[in-house]
Image (cartoon, rainbow, N blue to C red):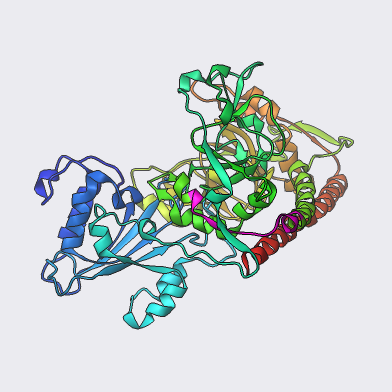
């Protein structure tokens, strides 16, 4: 459905409204023949439809005129790069029929998809792990004789009597109860009995200042990361907003109280007494009773899979934000070993964490830089004997026949910022042959180099599969592969980012013209030297790969230790 639109035709429907979400649902119900015994709909809706107060009557209309079978909660990001709105699928039968009391269901199935098999970012790359949707597909008939198996794979039964009493809200997680695992070896206590909670400060946006001395550092959800506080992302305000009990101290545990469902409940350990540091209103601080629990032990417990399940279960979710209350936080039941045993656990986990920190430094600091070399060919991209510069194009967005074909058509989403040089073998978006023929987009051969030259300047990729490219790129086709190796040229152009930014011009956004792009200097060593340099870089990269494995192995070790405390 076209999310959050307005309409002037709402008076044609049973529940007159200018809200497009309401009218779309009513329209889909009315579109099904009321005489049909098997009329059914599966409708993708923005999650707001499931709980917004102004749509209460529409949900009531849905329940009265359909047999609701299931609600499938999709993770935020499944429709990227087009929209990041969190969505759900409503599946109903007996559509557009007044449901008699004897036919009415007493409940419906709720299924929470955490992964659809693709990365939940603009790239939407296929993952090695299976899609949760395959579980739904296996049981999509919702047969009564499969109930036990369905519950085991993640289906939940939502009683409709609770829905009717709760403004017809259809978000299944609102009715979820969390069963806490009990450790066989350790006492189980509520978090509220061993710690106190403090909410962060509020301040108007106009209070924010540029970084300067003698200001208050406000740690926000953006600055409080799982591996520590990123002080490059704190907010600065006047010290007059400071409150003594809301400053952060060594041993405090910061927790994200309002965030996306995936990140709500994320904790950050405060490892030292930072000067003039407080925390924002979306954050909370957990301050422990040192006679009962060590803060580092508690940090690891709150970072465990079991705790994250709890936060996800109790979070109150709106369209984009999930919230955890201090009441729910205090009701988290967790294992509490003796203090001496906690210290043993901390000692073991700290050793693993040091391994992870060291490995991350290797991974994060490595960049495949070209070494010094003796230039054999000094030219520019305008050298017609060596290169052809090709611009991209965009098919008309007004013609649906141009989109969704089998031709890869790359955009900036296919060149992520975190990758130094991207290998491109497929794209987020695709076009049809008709779309290609009716635009200035041209097919790029394998080995072509694509460079972002509009607004975001200097991202570089190597084409590994024939594809078309949009107008935000300049593309270099190498005419003499016996003189230039594509990977070498890609690395060389990546190091020319500063030169590209100088060549760009424009008021609204900067862009490099084809003429100016051709001015970029290209200094090439011999082919054998290029091969030697690339071999050396590949050797360096082979040293980085084990560091990535170290991170994976020791993160698993930490999980194993914590799971053992929980009794697994």
**Within the magenta stretch, is there residue 123?**
no
Looking at this view, is 120 or 286 the one in front?
286
Range shown magenta: 329-343
Question: How many discs appear?
Answer: 0
Residue 361 rendering spot, x and y as whole percentages = 77, 44
Q: Is residue 410 visible?
A: yes
Residue 500: image location, x then y, percent? 66, 28
- Where residue 498 appears, x then y in whole percent? 69, 27
Q: Residue furthest bottom?
A: 145
Left or right of 215 in this view: 538 = right
Q: Let me know if residue 340 is in the magenta part.
A: yes
Residue 431 visible? The answer is no
Residue under the image location 71 percent in, 34 percent down: 383
- Residue closest to the far right: 374
Residue drawn at x 18%, y 54% as measured from the top left: 26
The answer to whether residue 501 is above or below residue 141 is above
Q: Nearer the viewer, residue 306 or 105?
A: 306
Instruction: Please state if 376 lies on the left or on the right of 559 as rendered.
Output: right
- Give the image quarter of residue 344: bottom right
Q: Relative to 137, does residue 450 appear above or below in the rendering?
A: above
The quadrant in which residue 230 appears is: top right
Q: Is residue 561 left or right of residue 331?
A: right
Q: Position of residue 316 (x, y in %)?
A: 40, 49
Q: Which quadrant does the C terminus fall into? A: bottom right
User: In front: 43, or 457?
Assistant: 43
């Amino acid at each position: 459905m076209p999310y959050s639109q307005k309409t002037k035709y709402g008076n044609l429907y049973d529940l007159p409204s200018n809200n497009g979400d309401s009218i779309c649902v009513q329209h889909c119900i009315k579109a099904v023949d009321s005489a049909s015994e098997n009329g059914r709909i599966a409708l993708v809706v923005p999650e707001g439809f499931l709980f917004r107060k102004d749509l209460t009557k529409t949900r009531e209309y849905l329940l009265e005129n359909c047999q609701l079978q299931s609600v499938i909660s999709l993770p935020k990001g499944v429709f990227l790069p087009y929209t990041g709105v969190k969505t759900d699928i409503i599946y109903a039968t007996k559509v557009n029929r007044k449901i008699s009391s004897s036919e009415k269901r007493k409940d419906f199935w709720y299924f929470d998809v955490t992964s659809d098999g693709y990365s939940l970012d603009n790239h939407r790359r296929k993952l090695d792990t299976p899609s949760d949707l395959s579980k739904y597909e296996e049981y999509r008939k919702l047969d009564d004789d499969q109930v036990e198996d369905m519950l085991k794979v993640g289906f939940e039964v939502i009683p409709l009597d609770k829905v009717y009493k709760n403004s017809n809200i259809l978000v299944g997680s609102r009715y979820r109860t969390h069963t806490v695992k009990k450790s066989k070896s350790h006492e189980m206590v509520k978090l509220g009995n061993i710690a106190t909670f403090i909410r962060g400060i509020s301040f108007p946006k106009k209070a924010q200042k540029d970084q300067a001395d003698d200001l208050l550092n406000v740690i926000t959800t953006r600055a409080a990361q799982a591996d520590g506080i990123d002080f490059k992302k704190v907010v600065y305000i006047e010290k007059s907003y400071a409150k003594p009990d809301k400053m952060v101290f060594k041993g405090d545990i910061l927790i994200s109280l309002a965030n996306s469902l995936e990140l709500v409940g994320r904790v950050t350990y405060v490892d030292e007494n930072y000067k003039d540091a407080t925390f924002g209103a979306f954050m909370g601080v957990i301050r422990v009773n040192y006679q009962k629990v060590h803060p580092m032990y508690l940090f690891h417990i709150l970072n465990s899979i079991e705790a994250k399940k709890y936060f996800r279960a109790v979070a109150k979710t709106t369209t984009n934000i999930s919230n955890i209350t201090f009441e729910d936080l205090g009701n988290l039941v967790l294992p509490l070993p003796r203090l001496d045993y906690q210290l043993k656990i901390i000692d073991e986990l700290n050793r693993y964490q040091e391994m992870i920190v060291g490995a991350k430094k290797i991974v994060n600091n490595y960049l495949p830089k070209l070494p010094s070399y003796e230039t054999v060919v000094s030219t520019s991209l305008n050298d017609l004997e060596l290169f052809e510069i090709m611009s991209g194009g965009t098919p008309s967005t007004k013609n649906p026949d141009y989109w969704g074909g089998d031709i890869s058509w790359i955009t900036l989403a296919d060149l992520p910022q975190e990758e130094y040089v991207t290998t491109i073998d497929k794209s987020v978006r695709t076009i049809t042959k008709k779309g290609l023929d009716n635009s200035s987009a041209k097919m790029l051969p394998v080995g072509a180099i694509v460079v972002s030259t509009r607004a975001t300047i200097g991202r570089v990729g190597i084409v590994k599969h024939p594809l078309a490219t949009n107008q935000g790129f300049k593309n270099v086709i190498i005419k003499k592969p016996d003189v230039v190796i594509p990977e070498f040229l890609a690395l060389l152009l990546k190091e020319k980012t500063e030169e590209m930014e100088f060549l760009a011009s424009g008021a609204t956004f900067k862009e490099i013209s084809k003429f100016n792009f051709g001015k970029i200097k290209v200094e090439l060593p011999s082919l054998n030297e290029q091969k030697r340099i690339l071999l050396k870089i590949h050797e360096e990269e082979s040293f980085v790969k084990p560091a990535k494995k170290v991170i994976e192995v020791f993160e698993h070790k930490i999980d194993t230790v914590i799971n053992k405390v929980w009794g697994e």
